[in-house]
Amino acid sequence: MERFAGKVAVVTGASGGIPSAITRELLKWNLTVVGLDVNMDNMKAFQDELFKNAGTDVGKFYPLKCDITNDDEIRKTFDWIKGQLKSVSILINGAGIASPQDNDLQKVSAELFDTIFGANAKGTILCAKEAMNLMMENSEPGHIINICSITGYDTHCHQGNTMYVASKHAVRVFSDGLRREITRKRANIKVTTLSPGLVSTELAGKTTFGNIGGKEEILKPEDIAKGCISILNTPHHVLASVASIEFQID
């Protein structure tokens, strides 16, 4: 992680769940973190909590309001990053949405479909595009980590939430395609798909996923954050293209 010290990381959905845990870890490594979130009240509370007991040996944090389902807001946000911070070295696409209404396709509205796919798939793709543009424009070695889900690979581990699962499959396929595109362009950018099992977050409470493995224990956001740091810590010539994090079954 030393090579990223002082560099800029962008984290979407930064105020809660897995992204907030990742933000905390990145700041410990003295990175400048730009946190994107649509809810600035949550972001302000997170920022206050973040630096309440922090010492001086932490990175800088810039909370920005950005609706990642809105392509215009995404462009303006990355224009600000370019103007103020010059470039991006790390993008963590962590924002995600689930809904308890997504358990019966006959009741799924077009609006709910747009919301889920907008946040989980479209937002991931457009943020990756803008970050990649900055990385390549500045010849900046970069790493894009798309937070997917075990359900993006295995459709047997859920009992509903069809739109959520479909959106995570889209993230997986997009990540695979982007990785091949970057290889073809010989860009110095890594792409990793990080797919957790069930994690103890507010989002998990909006799904109907069963207890994976038949156990009551589930992962903590901090588990995913540490996994993310491990991936970023890989040597320059090593790519962890796909990573899955699940709890240990005794």
Image (tube, grey):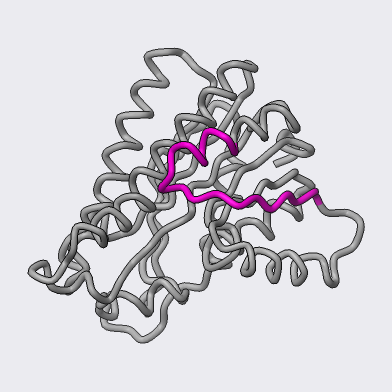
Q: Give the range drawn in magenta.
A: 59-77
Quarter of the image holding residue 203? bottom left
The residue at the point 63 percent across, 62 percent down is 40
Residue 44, quarter of picture = bottom right
Query: Which one is nearer the viewer's eye here, 1 or 27?
Result: 27
Residue that sits furthest to the top in the current view: 185
Give the residue furthest to the left: 106
Residue 187 at least partly seen: yes
Residue nearest the viewer, comparing 91 with 12: 12
Q: In the picture, which quadrant includes the N terminus? A: top right
Give the image location of residue 13, x and y in percent: 53, 57
Q: Is residue 226 visible?
A: no
- The picture places residue 187, in percent across and down from the top left corner, at 50, 17
Q: In this view, does 8 lie to the left or right of 212?
A: right
The residue nearer to you, when weighing 231 against 5, is 5
Q: Residue at x 31, y 59 (%)?
A: 150
Residue at image coords 51%, 30%: 130
Residue at the extreme right of the image, as rendered: 56
